[in-house]
């Protein structure tokens, strides 16, 4: 009895698994076909480095326009930030 129930259940699962992919909806009628010659968009290389550059540039602008000197570290922080930006830009040039 238990074997018959397991067999029926397995058959039902198999039928459902094979039925759902076959019944997927078609593309909407107003969808534009993609030309065969269209190239897919190339993902940006090293997005983390680009994000870091953007963050460093924002931080530098913030420090540069700040009214205080960050406990005497502002000048050195600006210099270090400029150097970090320069190094990351060099890294990206060598990745081409």
Image (cartoon, rainbow, N blue to C red):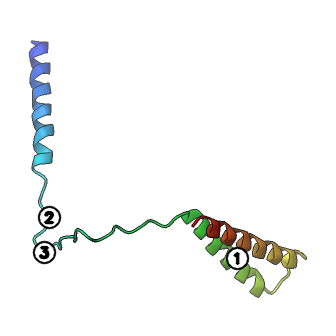
Mark nearer the viewer, 2 or 1: 2
- The residue lying toward the viewer, choosing from 4 and 76, is 76
Up the image or down, 3 lies above or below 45; here it is above
Q: Residue at x 22, y 70 (%)?
A: 34
Residue 12 occupies which quadrant of the picture? top left
Quarter of the image where the C terminus is located: bottom right
Of the two numbered discs 3 and 1 on the same chain, state the one appearing first in sequence: 3
Query: What is the x, y in percent for residue 87?
Result: 73, 69
Q: Residue at x 86, y 79 (%)?
A: 75
Where does label 1 land, which residue? 59
- How dense is the environment of label 1, judged by Cα within 10 Å: few (below 14), some, or many (20 and up)? some
Dot 3 falls on a residue whose secondary structure is: loop
Query: What is the x, y in percent for residue 50?
Result: 59, 69
Q: CA distance from mark 3 to mark 2?
A: 8 Å
Where does label 2 land, which residue? 27
Where does label 3 land, which residue? 30
In the displayed structure image, the side of residue 22 where residue 63 appears, left or right:
right
- How dense is the environment of label 3, judged by Cα within 10 Å: few (below 14), some, or many (20 and up)? few
Find the residue positioned furthest to the right: 72
Dot 2 falls on a residue whose secondary structure is: loop
Query: What is the x, y in percent for residue 56?
Result: 68, 73
- The residue lying toward the viewer, choosing from 67 and 31, is 31
Up the image or down, 60 lies above or below 22; here it is below
For the question of whether residue 70 can be seen, the reply is: no
Q: Are marks 3 and 1 in contact (CB under 8 Å)?
A: no
């Amino acid at each position: 009895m238990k074997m018959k129930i397991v067999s029926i259940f397995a058959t039902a699962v198999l039928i459902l698994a094979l039925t759902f992919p076959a019944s997927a909806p078609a593309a909407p009628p107003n969808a534009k076909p993609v030309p065969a010659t269209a190239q897919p968009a190339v993902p940006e290389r090293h997005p983390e480095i680009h994000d870091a550059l953007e963050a460093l540039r924002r931080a530098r602008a913030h420090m540069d326009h700040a009214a205080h000197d960050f406990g005497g570290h502002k000048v050195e922080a600006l210099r270090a930030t400029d150097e970090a930006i320069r190094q990351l830009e060099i890294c990206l040039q060598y990745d081409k």
